[in-house]
Amino acid sequence: MAVGKNKRLSKGKKGTKKKIVDPFTKKDWYDIKAPALFTNRNVGKTLVTRSSGTRIASDHVKGRVVPVSLADLNKDEDQAYRVMRLRIEDVQGRDCLTNFHGMDITTDKLRSLVRKWQTLIEAHVDVKTTDGYLLRMFCIAFTKKRQNQIKKTCYAKSSQVRQIRKKMFDIMTREATTCDLKDLVAKFIPNTIGKQIEKECQGIYPLRDVLIRKVKILKAPKFDAMKLMEIHAESAAPKDTGKKVDRPASSIDAQPAAAKPVGDTTA
């Protein structure tokens, strides 16, 4: 067979495989830090390809959104139905500093609230905090039976629903527009706004399970590193509450004896 006719002789072995390199050898782990508002600051870790050439690893970490259960953040299992969304704003060394980016409740919690023979009332409103964050807040509430009610159903009239929805708008707007984002998130955690709505709507129709079910950030102000550091200002230095001091026995013995009643002649 002529060499010139056989094209495979000069190309070497057919099917030579390329050397496989594990992609994880080129990646680094970064720690995600939650704001100081929460009890547990260490949310978890995130993976990013190591910096090389003009590609900077920290730029590819910024902007990532991490959903975290509030039960993990505050070490309280009763708050497991609430999910906080944290957005990575800045990277310092291997620490990713996050800020609040939204809130939601789990699907199973929402499904467990919906029942028959009642009215579901929803409302949503766009509000702006004092530090320039534009948020959309969603509220949900359910009617409940009045005290000693025998009737099976507890449906609210359409006029009552409109009144309750107006109250929701007013309270959500009032609570959100008078504080900054940090203080507003502090209100979301114990459901302060939901309790306030329930209290003020008692005169219209009794409500139960009033929740801020969802919060979305529509527009955020320009990134400010100083404000982010304030949010993450760790109370690393423990508060000086003093220490327990044992009372010396001599001071106990030196206490004056109780005064005797007048006319008591006993020795």
Image (spheres, rainbow, N blue to C red):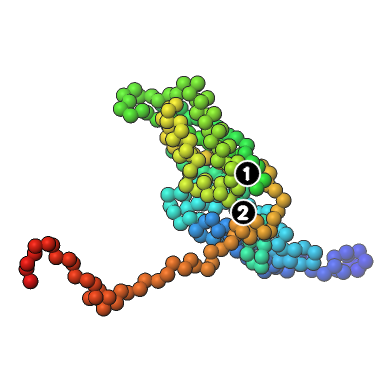
Q: Give the residue at x 46% y 33%.
A: 200
Q: Residue furthest right?
A: 4
The image shows residue 94, relative to residue 100, as above or below, that is below
Position in image of residue 199 (x %, y %): 44, 35
Q: Quadrant of the C terminus?
A: bottom left
Residue occupying the far front of the picture = 263
Does 175 appear above or below 259?
above
Residue name at image x 71 percent, y 66 percent = 50
Which of 235/30 is in front? Answer: 235
Give the side of residue 244 with respect to residue 3, left or right. Answer: left
Q: What residue is drawn where x is 34% and y is 22%?
A: 151
Amino acid residing under circle 1: Thr
Q: In the figure, residue 169 lies in which quadrant?
A: top right
> Would you say residue 24 is visible in this rendering?
no
In the image, which disc is placed on residue 179? none
Position of residue 238 measured from the top left corner of the image (x, y, whole percent): 49, 67
Q: CA distance from mark 2 to mark 1?
A: 15 Å
What residue is disc 1 on?
Answer: 129
Q: Residues within 10 Å of mark 2 (few under 14, many from 20)?
A: many
Left or right: 62 as drawn, with respect to 148: right
Disc 2 residue type (three-letter) = Asn
Between marks 2 and 1 in the image, the one whose residue lies nearer the viewer: 1
Q: Quick one: label 1, few (<14), some, or many (20+) residues within 10 Å?
A: some
To which residue does mark 2 refer? 99
| Location of residue 130 in the rendering, given as x and y in whole percent from the top left corner | 63, 45
Residue at x-position 55% and y-position 41%: 175
190 sits to left or right of 252: right
The quarter of the picture where the N terminus appears is: bottom right
